[in-house]
Amino acid sequence: MMQPFILISILVFALIVVGALIVAAIAMQKSSVDSFQSGQELHPRGHWISIGISIGTGLGVTLGLIFDNLALGIAIGAAVGSGIGAILELQNQDKTRPLTDQELKLQKRGLGLGLFVLLLIGGIFVLLLVTRSR
């Protein structure tokens, strides 16, 4: 039987890869709609950074599993991905547009949902630590 840590690591890796694929699919679909409407390919500000972080985090999970340090792998992957995304953002600066009102609302909702999930997971983690320590 697999150890729980390995099973959780595999599950986290799978979820991050699926999330990255969903973000990439949405971004490609959005960019094709934008390019069809305007005649050129315009991306919203921050597009390349989000793609870089998604791909970097997925690769970081892989490195973390290989070197048996998942947290460090994710941190390094996200840092490298955001750096690469920032470079791509600067290179494609002439192909970016400001965020629309709908995108800003969606971004705020996503941030709120992300913070809620983070607090929920943190609370569960603290609860598990407290119950295990007794």
Image: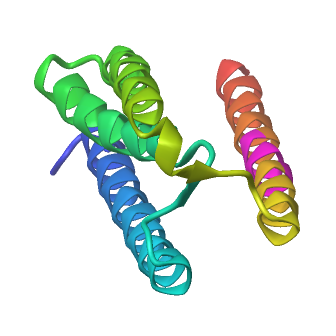
Q: Nearer the viewer, residue 51 or 57?
A: 51
- Residue 50 shown left or right of residue 120 in the figure: left
Q: Residue at x 41, y 79 (%)?
A: 32
Viewport quadrant of the C terminus: top right
Write the residue at 65% across / 27% down. 132
In the rendered view, how is the structure colored? rainbow
Q: Is residue 117 magenta?
A: yes
Residue 28: x and y in percent read: 39, 71
The residue at the far left in this view is 66
Task: Give the left or right position of residue 116, taking residue 14 as reference.
Answer: right
Q: Is residue 47 magenta?
A: no
Residue 118 in the image: above or below residue 86: below
Residue 18 in view here:
yes
Q: Position of residue 21 (x, y in %)?
A: 34, 64
State left or right for residue 37 relative to residue 73: right
Name the residue at 34% across, 19% down: 80
Total marks placed: 0
Q: Nearer the viewer, residue 39 or 34?
A: 39
Residue appearing at x 79%, y 47% in the figure: 120
Range drawn in magenta = 112-118
Looking at this view, name the residue that lies furthest to the front: 39
Question: Principal SS element in the magenta part?
Answer: helix
